[in-house]
Amino acid sequence: MQNIKDLSGMTYKIIDHTADVGLELEAATLSGLFTAAADGLMHIICPRCLIQPVQSHALQVCGENLEELLVNWLSELNYLCQVQHFLTARVQIREIQERFLQAEVTGERSDPLRHAVRSEIKAVTYHRIEVHQEAADKWRGRIYFDI
Amino acid sequence: MSTPIDRITDYLFEIPQTGKMRVPARIYATANMLPDILKDRAAEQAAQVAWLPGIVGYSYAMPDVHWGYGFPIGGVAAFDMDKGIISPGGVGYDINCGVRLLRTGLQRSEIESRLRPAVEALFRAIPSGVGSTGKLKLNEKEEKRVLENGALWAVRNGYGGEEDLDKIEENGRMAGADPDQISARARERGRSQLGTLGSGNHFIELGVVDEIYDPRAAAAMGLRLDQITLFIHTGSRGLGHQVCDDAIKEMLHAAQKYGIELPDRQLCCAPISSPEGQRYLAAMSAAVNFAFANRQMITHWAREALMQAWSISPRDLDLQVVYEVAHNIAKVERHTVAGVERPLCVHRKGATRAFGPHHPEIPAAYREIGQPVLIPGDMGRCSYLLTGTTRAMSDSFGSACHGAGRVMSRTQAVKSARGRSVVRELAERGILVRAESSETIAEEIPEAYKNVTQVVDAVAGAGLACKVAKLKPLGVIKG
């Protein structure tokens, strides 16, 4: 299990699944948790060190609850990658509530000569999904992808 | 959760009906295979499928079962048309992922020394790999025609001939498809991906008939020992993934609306007769057609590539469809339950239709032997061709397994391949492998899968299908 932690305490762990792959998430804030999820997703798709922050997209995502919001958020990033061939280098969440988030994603168009895109994510699933606040400064989450 | 399991026969085990299960769950396997199956949550998932309203008989798991999302991969469940549900999770994200087997007019000895150019030609001719896009970009109107007509669209547009259609499940065109039930985003994902293999476990494989168990059935399928064959394994690509994704969102709300209790959100569903259920059925059928067209186009390019690589005429190549089956699909079929024939909505997720002899939906050429059942194994060992049985009709809604089934996660497989040259190892065994990505080859190493021979023997032992022939890989193209 890979454990990747950045300086702000946001982490994602890649979790093994017989057919697919998932993420265990931990962060001090909800926005940190959603950022860690985006980082984890992009880690699975393509090594982020190879992606340059060339252009930005503003995204607005809605959901009926936090779980749906997380699925829709990651599905949007996956859509950008699958259809627009846009690889995300970093995300900045401007605003997040239980049913809404607004973010700026920065990255560049996929270039087979420079980017080692290694996985095609079919979908972000609700399988064993979790998003919950464990303490005042601790959020946890779990999500699986179909690859 | 530890799941209680009772032995019914040497090839069949049962999880008794407890708690909110409406019927028991049944697992086809041998005692030797059971520990691997119970290692992950596949058995628990088969039991959870039994919670769903209107389930008929049993929730089944085939010997290649493994942990999926909601439904296990290798699961079969049939639902009553009035009281039952339809679930996108019971079909899976890759709608109509399936396998086509073709035979050539060539013997192994004729091409053995010219295998590499053929593998290279197939690799060049058929777009593969992560995010692969096709050679043609459809406009909206043309894409709609693909979704309505499936493989028939491909044939009408010059990809293969009418004779190909006879040997495809549903003749390559699922009725009831409504492209208007497919979201703009799903159509957008599909538009540039028609005629592409994709990545993961999808492949094209040149093989050889290595052993024949049932000479009469093999002869009916035009197969003989040492004959060169071609397998194509792919599905509905991004379009199907998005159709499933969209439907799951809608079904999560529908399940609440209709008061359906779900042990796992990925089992979300709606009554078959509800507007949500009917919308999904129409959208899924359109995605099914996209996959039928996809495999037909790949077949056409494979014909061109092989003729060119071997400098032979269409008549000498004689690449003909033996059969094509879907293994991620939900269909309304007629089955006899407790002596009464009735329509049921049969979900097969990682399971193959295996209709017995004389069934009207089998091509006339195979009516006496039963429907061909195609079971690809991993890229290093072998694959099998079987036929469906009368026993499958009465015991498992005319269904059998679909492949070997993974035992290793992709991460474990990559770790196990580290420091090895999997391509060289396979070449030493006489198998050429060509892939867009070396990571895919590592993820797909043979030992990442169960031994398909054990899976097939369990299915044959249970009487769900009869072994016809064993095929061995010679050249494999991976995404």
Image (spheres, coloured by chain):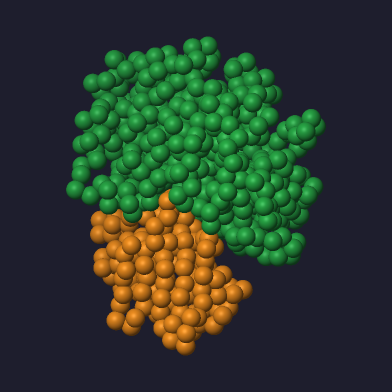
The residue located at (20%, 36%) in the rendering is B424
Q: Position of residue B257 (x, y in %)?
A: 74, 65
The number of discs equals: 0
The residue located at (40%, 45%) in the rendering is B407
Report which quarter residue B336 is drawn in.
Answer: top right
State left or right for residue B258 relative to residue A16.
right
Is residue B304 among the parts visible in the rendering? no
- Tell me the shade of chain B: green
Residue nearer the viewer, A134 or B321: A134
What quarter of the picture does the C terminus of chain B occupy? top left
Residue nearer the viewer, B135 or B59: B59
Q: Residue extending furthest bottom?
A: A136
Q: In the figure, A56 relative to B470: above or below?
A: below
State left or right for residue A36 relative to residue B86.
left
Q: Position of residue A130 (x, y in %)?
A: 51, 70
Q: Position of residue B173 (x, y in %)?
A: 62, 36
Q: In the figure, A49 relative to B362: above or below?
A: below
Is residue A13 among the parts visible in the rendering? yes
Which chain is rendered orange in the image? A
Q: Position of residue B81 (x, y in %)?
A: 76, 45
The residue located at (50%, 53%) in the rendering is B41
The residue located at (36%, 22%) in the rendering is B208
